[in-house]
Image (cartoon, rainbow, N blue to C red):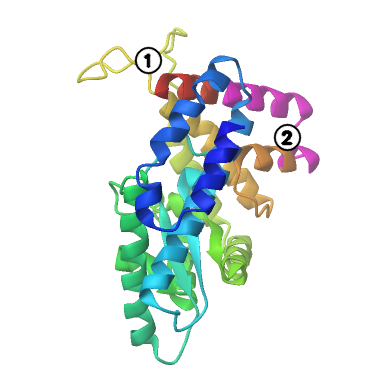
Amino acid sequence: TSTYLLIKTVKSANNIQEIENVHSKLEKMLLDPLKNGANPEYVTRLITTFSDAIIDKVITFSLKKMGPPPCKFVFLTMGSEGRKEQTLISDQDNAIIFQDVKNAETAKQYFDDLAKLICDQLNMAGYRFCDGDNMAKNPKWCQPLSRWKDYFNTWIRTSNPENLLHSSIFFDFRGTWGEMALADELKQYLLDSIGNWSGFLRNLTENTLYFKPPISRFGKLVVETRGEQKGALDIKLAMLPIVDFTRVYALKNGISQTNTLTRLFRLCTRRALTNKEYTNIVRAYNYMMQLRFLRQI
């Protein structure tokens, strides 16, 4: 109840100061539910609802300051947020798609300024900047629809799996605010392009195999051997094979959803996974997500 009241508070905010560092309040509210065994899927969806409310409010503030946009646009979230799998330690992974228009330079300048304002205010709300600069405030990731199609076409047709490695985050995008038809069109373009270029899935699979489960040849857990995290197990890294495997099979089967558990369910209903495989993977995923939440708390 308290988390939904917090979401209501976000939605009623009148300025960015009223939601400054509001993300930290959510962490405290989720402590007891997580300790008492709350379903990780429910918790991640609640965190997503909270984050989407923040984005909605921040964009509203930003548009009020910038004035009306020159054309329609959509704000994308990517990575864990795009999959609706955010945990309590979250950075920004986002982008902007805007319509192709005649006065392209004017539109680009407007959306570059808007993106900077949005990302700066999200940082104020408690969502830190992405270390890899995969944010809309990076001019590279604030582009018209035609340029985004060019990006995906290049990534899909690359002959080198390593060239694809750093762009895999973009394959888990979802429209969060604005003209959803732009995000839908890009998603359909992605799925159609993959169907015409099977080498892409092979490259994506090769990258997935780079990440090994942290278990040694003798069945022992592999932990960090140096630095501040010496002796610790990286649970996020342990989950990557599940997330990556599910992405490959979802794209192969034309599944447009980005959430890992939803993708797994769709794969099971399409008989791409057996019931036993589906159950085992979901149990492993939820168990590790629960561990991540408790550790972050």
Q: Position of residue 20 (x, y in %)?
A: 35, 47
The boundaries of the magenta stretch are: 267-287
Left or right: residue 109 compared with residue 200: left
- Around disc 2, counting alpha carbons within 10 Å, would you say few (fewer than 14), some (14 to 19), or many (20 or more)? some
Labelled disc at residue 273: 2
Q: Position of residue 112 (x, y in %)?
A: 33, 72
Residue 150 seen in the current view: yes
Q: Secondary structure at mark 1?
A: loop
Residue 221: quadrant of the picture: top left
On screen, residue 72 above or below 285: below
- Around disc 1, counting alpha carbons within 10 Å, would you say few (fewer than 14), some (14 to 19), or many (20 or more)? some
Quickly name the residue at label 1.
Answer: 222
On screen, residue 254 above or below 97: above
* Three-letter code, disc 1: Val
The residue shown at (65%, 37%) is 261
Q: Nearer the viewer, residue 155 or 262?
A: 262
* Three-letter code, disc 2: Leu
Q: Nearer the viewer, residue 135 or 150?
A: 135
- Membership of 215 in magenta stretch: no
Left or right: residue 162 compared with residue 195: left
The residue shown at (75%, 37%) is 268
Quarter of the picture holding the N terminus: top right
The residue shown at (31%, 68%) is 139
Q: Nearer the viewer, residue 155 or 279?
A: 279
Labelled disc at residue 44: none
On screen, residue 284 above or below 49: above
